[in-house]
Structures are given as C-alpha cells and as structure tokens.
Amino acid sequence: MRIAAGERAPAAIVLEDATKVIDGVTVLDGVSFTAPPGQVTAFIGPNGAGKTTTLRAILGIDHLTSGRALIGGRPFAAHRWPAQVVGALLTADGAHPRRTARGHLRVVAASNALPKSSVDDALRLTGIASIADIPVGQMSLGMRQRLGLATALIGDPAVLILDEPHNGLDAGAIRWLRVLLRALADGGRTVLVSTHLMAEIETFCDDVVVIDGGRIVMAGPLGHFVGGASGEEARRSLEEQYLDMVDGG
C-alpha cells in the first residue's frame, strides 16, 4: 500500500518532563520522549503503567501537573483546526450507536471545516464503505475500531495517536492495519501506537518507548531492543526484552 504524503507539515510529538499527580499519587513521573515524523513509535508497558494517561495528556484531555506535551511545537489546544493536525483513536465507542458511520463522519467533517469528500475518502481508506449506512450499534467491535480509525484519518492529519487499535480485529484486519500504519509513516506522518501485541508491533515499528510505573524505562530505535547485529548477543524478541524490563509484567 502506498499513501501519498499528507498536505500538513510534518509534526513531532514531544514530551518534556511530563508529570501528572492525582490525589497525591504520581501517575506520570517525568516522562520524556519524542515520536518523530516518518516513523512508527510503539508505546508499550503493563496495564496501569501510564500509557493512556500519557496519550490523553498529549491530546490535552488530561492536564499535566508539570512538564509539557507538544505536537509540532505547540500544545494540542493551540492548533486552530486540531483534526487537520492530529488524528486520535482512544476508544472504539466514540460514535453514537444510533448514528451511521457516514453520519458520524459527516458531523466530524462539518465541525472541523473539512470537505464533504473527506467522508468518502475515510470510508474507503478504512474499508467500511460497504457498511457506511448501518447504525454503529449494530457493528462489531472490529468495525467500530475501523470507524474510529476513519475518524482519526478524516482530516489527513500529520500525526496519528492510537491506543490499542488492534482490539477486536481478526488476523486479516490486523495485517491490514499493519500495512496501513507503515504506509502512513512512510508518507511522512508521525504514528504513535500503544499496544500489548509485541510480536505484531515489532514487525513494523521503528522506535520503541517502554513505560512502567509512570516512568520511561527505555526509549530508542527497535534495533537497540532486539540487537542482532554482528558481534552482539543473539537476537531476542521485543517481547522477551520487554518482559525483562518490567520484571515479567
């Protein structure tokens, strides 16, 4: 799959000493990393490690106690038309169950000053054009995930932020998503994916960020995690390295 470079200027995601304290509990503790344009960055960690809180902070949903979360050098809220800069999928249940996929996307397009053609483009790109007029409440989890991706992609954004996008997808759909995300990154977009599917994300990611207990354990190119170069130890899978880092989960 080839996807042309988007019309938006490339934009990195940058977190600088991001800290979040809730009721005296430090949920994020000095989180710092960069997800650069043109690459898929895997964001991994155990349940409760702070992944979703980090993504919500990047999107301005959760406010940081200190530190900064920037997209293209600005906080998310500082972008006039954020859907044209950032596309996000945090849940598969973002659309009203009695609204159709087409109706949902039309609302998103209108509220973000996007052309009507963007609706059909998003439906085609995510493979749900044939079910576009079925109520969302009648869709499977996998189809709702694709609708969530269509919502994220409708503005042809420079940045994609996805939280567990593989949920509900069968093997064929997982392969489709892999090809899509790789193509989007190869088109110059920034792709940040939170996932528990280590073997899957290892097949196409460029960088890996590991978070545990609200702190970044390690961040860098995939090759730094799995090794395998001449003279190094035998190659280990990302899952093996990850489990060592987080004491087996």
Image: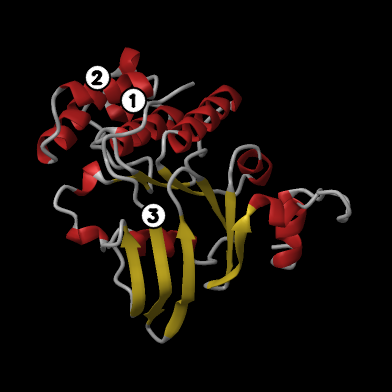
Q: Nearer the viewer, mark 1 or mark 3?
A: 3
Q: Which residue is mark 3?
A: 12
Q: Which residue is mark 2?
A: 120
The residue wearing badge 1 is 138
Res 18 quadrant in image? bottom left
Of mark 1 and mark 2, the one earlier in the sequence is 2
- The type of residue carrying mark 1 is Gln
Q: Residues within 10 Å of mark 3 (few under 14, many from 20)?
A: many
Dot 1 or dot 3: first in sequence order is 3
Q: Secondary structure at mark 2?
A: helix
Residue at coordinates 57% horizontally, 27% vertically from top-left? Answer: 175
Q: Nearer the viewer, mark 2 or mark 3?
A: 3
Rendered residue at 47%/40% (across/down): 165
Instruction: Indicate which disc residue 171 carries.
Output: none
Please report the residue visible at 29 percent of the width from the left and 44 percent of the height from the top.
Answer: 9
Q: Are marks 2 and 3 in contact (CB under 8 Å)?
A: no
Amino acid tagged 3: Ala
